[in-house]
């Protein structure tokens, strides 16, 4: 019976372990019930029938325990896969946040430089240099920000 169960498992590899163990439990129940029935039908001694019953109960218990263990292992594997997925998502989120933080720091640095330049040009009182700086430096930033929004 054990050899036939391994042969069945190798022929049908797509069957989940839980269903396989359940099918094995049902098959064992049927086979041992047939042995007990045959023993009572052909008037086997009571000791042999009792032994069949004891063996039957032992196999049922062993298969049930195996079923429970495999179910617990499967649940643990699913939990581990879920944790790995969550960890990967957290790593991706962290990477995005770090990138956003770096972009914000760069923007802050550029913003401070622009304000410092504007302050210097205003202090000089030269409107032509101020207008030129605005057209060359500040006005193109609008296109840069619009392009960045389009990427998101």
Image: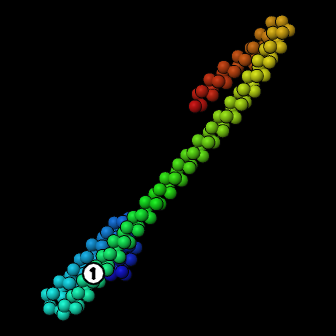
Q: Is residue 28 above or below residue 129?
A: below
Q: Residue at x 83, y 14 (%)?
A: 120
Query: Relative to 42, does residue 140 appear above or below in the rendering?
Result: above
Q: Residue 106's image quarter?
A: top right
Q: Position of residue 107 (x, y in %)?
A: 71, 27
Query: Going by the image, does 151 lie left or right of 127?
Result: left
Residue 43 visible from this viewpoint:
yes
Left of 95 or right of it: where is 126? right
Provide residue 105's location: percent of width, then percent of height: 71, 31
View extreme (right): residue:
124
Image quadrant in which the N terminus is located: bottom left
Location of residue 48 by image quarter: bottom left
Name the foreground residue: 31 vs 10.
31
- Give coordinates of residue 32: x percent, y percent: 25, 81
Return the x and y of residue 24 as percentages of the image width and height. 32, 73
In the rendered picture of this protein, how many numbered marks are placed on residues? 1
Tell me which residue sits at (46%, 57%) in the image.
78
Q: Mark 1: which secondary structure?
A: helix
22 to 3, vertically: above or below: above
Residue occupying image coordinates x 15% and y 87%: 40
Is 13 or 52 nearer to us in this picture?
Answer: 52
**Which residue in the structure is indicated by mark 1?**
56
Q: Is the C terminus in the top left, top right, bottom left or bottom right quadrant?
A: top right
Q: Residue furthest bottom?
A: 45
Q: For the point 36% across and 72% down, which residue is it? A: 65
Can residue 11 be seen in this snapshot? no
Q: Quadrant of residue 21?
A: bottom left
């Amino acid at each position: 019976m054990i050899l036939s169960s391994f042969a069945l498992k190798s022929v049908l590899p797509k069957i989940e372990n839980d269903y396989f163990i359940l099918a094995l439990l049902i098959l064992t129940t049927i086979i041992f019930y047939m042995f007990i029935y045959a023993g009572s039908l052909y008037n086997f001694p009571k000791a042999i029938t009792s032994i069949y019953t004891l063996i039957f109960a032992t196999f049922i218990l062993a298969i049930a325990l195996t079923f429970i263990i495999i179910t617990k292992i499967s649940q643990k594997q699913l939990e581990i896969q879920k944790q790995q997925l969550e960890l990967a998502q957290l790593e991706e989120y962290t990477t995005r946040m770090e990138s956003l933080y770096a972009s914000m720091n760069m923007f802050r640095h550029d913003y401070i430089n622009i304000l410092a330049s504007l302050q210097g040009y205003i202090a000089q009182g030269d409107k032509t240099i101020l207008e030129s700086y605005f057209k060359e430096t500040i006005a193109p930033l609008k296109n840069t920000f619009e392009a960045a929004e389009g990427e998101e």
